[in-house]
Image (cartoon, rainbow, N blue to C red):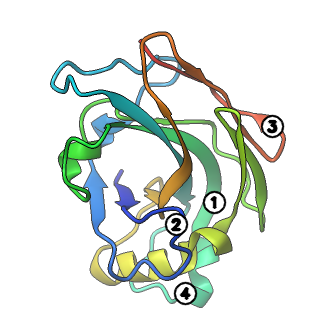
Amino acid sequence: MKIFVIDRPWADCGAPDGAPVLLLPDTSLTPKGMPVFLPDFCREGWELRSVTAYRIGRLGKSIGARFAERYIDGVTLGALLKPAGSLPCGSVLEYGFDSSLTLGDFRAVAEGYACEWGGESFEAGPERDGVARAIELLSRHCTLRTGDILIPRLGKAHVAAAMGATVDMSLGGAALRAVRVK
């Protein structure tokens, strides 16, 4: 399984053409039911950033944007743990350490979703997130496989990650796994 993160800000609704693409190891996923543990290699503070993640449901290479939606079989919200302002933007070390990404259960894909993440509300969806163009760009260079995860841009919502913090998430009114920080 590959985890792709396109490191572009929430406000960027255009194509992800020039944004750095990070490939996270599968060990960056927090095991289901486990809290997020703050690593000790950075003492400058941590933040949890909201993400909308899409799961690839079939094998594909050189996928055109107009066919991209056929390759997505699930969507969920998640939280990406990162040091607050300590590393240069686009560094895989910023996100790719063990248990840096927590995802909720995947749901069926629809046009748009009302999302709640840590008390903030926002809209998300494949078109709004630029998923089709992201799949087209990624599949030009590598084969997308069943189970790969695509995070087409960083989320708008974020909170300071401190011991004991909890972030509740819901997608389309359905509660997802809460993120607990220890």
Q: Which residue lies furthest to the right in this view?
A: 173
- In the picture, measured across the screen, residue 158 lies left or right of residue 121, that is left
Q: Give the amino acid type for the residue marked by disc 4 in the picture.
A: Ala
Mark number displayed over residue 174: 3
Give the number of the disc on residue 73: 1
Instruction: Please tell me whether mark 3 sits on a helix, a strand or a loop.
Output: strand
The amino acid sitting under disc 3 is Ala
Q: Name the residue under label 4.
A: 65
Dot 2 surroundings within 10 Å: few (below 14), some, or many (20 or more)? some
Q: Nearer the viewer, mark 3 or mark 2?
A: 3
Three-letter code for the amino acid on which mark 2 is drawn: Arg
**Measured Cα–Cα span from mark 3 to mark 2:** 26 Å
Q: Distance between the residues labelled 4 and 2?
A: 15 Å
Dot 2 corresponds to which residue?
58
Q: Quadrant of the C terminus?
A: top left
- State the residue at coordinates (46%, 17%): 181
Look at the numbered disc 2 and give the secondary structure of its residue: loop
At mark 1, the secondary structure is strand
Whether 175 is drawn above or below 165: the answer is: below
